[in-house]
Image: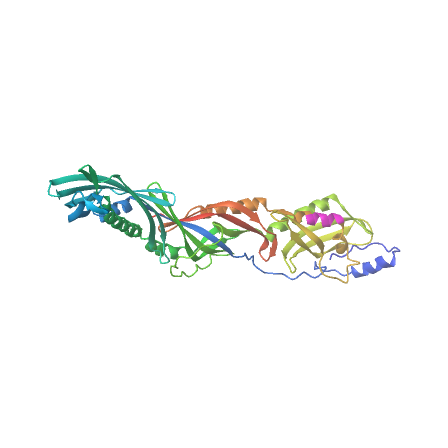
Amino acid sequence: MDCPETRPARRWPLALLGLSALLASCGGSKDVNPAPPRVETKAELPQQDSNIVVPVTALLAPVEAGINQRIPRQLWQINKPGERCVPPKKVKVFGKKVNVTPLIKCDIVGQVTRGAIKLVGNGNTLSITMPVSARISARDVGGIIKSETATGAAVVRATANVSVDRSWAPQAKVRIAYDWTNPPGIDFLGKRITFVDKADTKLAQVIAGIEREIPKEIAKIQLRQKLAALWPKAFTSIQLNRTNPEVWMRITPRALGFGGVRFTGGRIDMTLMLAALTETFVSARPPDPEPTPLPSVSPVKGPHGLNFFIPVLADFRELEPVVEKALAKTAAKGITLPGVGAVDAEFSRATIYATTGGRIAIGIKAKVTPQKGVLGSTSGVVWLSAVPYNEANGQLVRVRDLQIAGQTDRKSINLLWTLFQSPEVIESIRGALSHNFVRDYEKVLTKAREAIANRREGDFLLAADVKSVSNGLLKVTGEGLFLPVMVQGEANILYAPQ
């Protein structure tokens, strides 16, 4: 506090004489009231569960080629001597059936071959088509006809739904349908002799073989081996913001579920769902989580997408010059104090930090000099506190309950105390502490989008896109005013060998 100037003796009210005596000693600036305790808590963000899509893509052509290689062209041969080719014709005579024509036997020989097996994918269904040709001969028909050859054709059609078991091994559920477009047979003695029933039994066995071969060929994609390579690489951290503040998102996979197979053109797209814990750290890079062994297939619950928090942080040091500037403007306009009159006020330094109860402490060094009267200049630091707040999903921060902090036994006579109770000064501080996070908000989101857009880990690429953003309520931390921003988007981990 500055020493008052020496003035000629005059008659003054007793109160002012007492005040003059208190101000008679010289001394440096000091706190007018106790400074609130400083809180050093860091910004902490809640953990979030995320379900990340993990597509594994393979070509359908090698599966088709493999099935064609494993299924022989000649499906089976027929060699049935002494078959009953034409049953005897019977008539009733005296109540009994009597053969009019004899039983005609023959030897049936031949072979059944297939054409190229075609696989066509559409959505979650794999369609299989296999043409079948039969060439069958009936030899020594009743000792009358030496040989008669018949041909026939059939089309085997099947649909397969592919999935994996708990150990990630492919399995297929196949539904088969087939028909003879040209049933093999011969005409003899006015009767058509067909051999469809002879071929159907064997054809059913071939169809069952196709059902077994499809999972074997899809297994060549080596899904489990690829997942075993991908799984440990997913335990990582991604930098969301490089500086001011440094922010990292850590991903800890928890489960891996199978989301089904889709066939698109010539591709097999197997969709997996990675259930992961996403944590955000406002600090240097956190240690990567310890990888766990590849888990068995498990159901993944919850909506698809990537969920994480990013912090928008207003450093208290950025607010201090704003308060100083606002108070300087208020002082330039002039301040009048009740019972004192017009005063000259100087505000030279502001200090802001976090204190208890979700409040911020504001310490302002000031000097006040009455323009008239016996009182001289008074200087010191006055401490105030306030509660910063925002509306839900609002980026504009205001303060309420702005008041002088603590108690002092000199408040009734200290000019600085009176100065900081004046409406002009209070409103100036309140206005200066209002902070719009919009620019900080957009800046941090831009950096976060860039950080998660494409991130490569070996042969795997994390590709993510922000779909929606919302923010919570403001928090006072030792690092500054902290606005938690919730980001939701879509994320894929792609197998993309370099």
Q: Nearer the viewer, residue 225 or 174?
A: 174
Residue 73 visible in the current orientation: no
Location of residue 127 in the rendering, given as x and y in whole percent from the top left corner: 33, 43
Residue found at the very far right of the displayed protein: 11
Residue found at the very far front of the displayed protein: 94
How would you classify the magenta stretch by its main secondary structure? helix
Q: Nearer the viewer, residue 310 or 10?
A: 310
Q: Nearer the viewer, residue 8 or 206?
A: 206
Left or right position of 107 against 229: left
Location of residue 357 in the rendering, given as x and y in whole percent from the top left corner: 66, 60
Location of residue 354 in the rendering, given as x and y in whole percent from the top left corner: 62, 57
Q: Which residues are magenta?
A: 423-430
Identify the residue at image location x=54%, y=44%: 442
Location of residue 239 in the rendering, given as x and y in whole percent from the top left corner: 46, 52
Q: How is the image coloured?
A: rainbow
Residue 424 visible in the current orientation: yes
Does the segment drawn in magenta span residue 429? yes
Left or right position of 154 against 236: left
Residue 290 vs 200, above or below: the answer is: below
Identify the residue at image location x=74%, y=60%: 26
Q: Nearer the viewer, residue 432 or 134?
A: 134
Identify the residue at image location x=54%, y=57%: 46
Does the segment drawn in magenta span residue 88? no
Instruction: Please identify the quarter of the rendering in which residue 414 is found.
Output: bottom right
Left or right position of 392 against 136: right
For the N terminus, which image quadrant?
bottom right
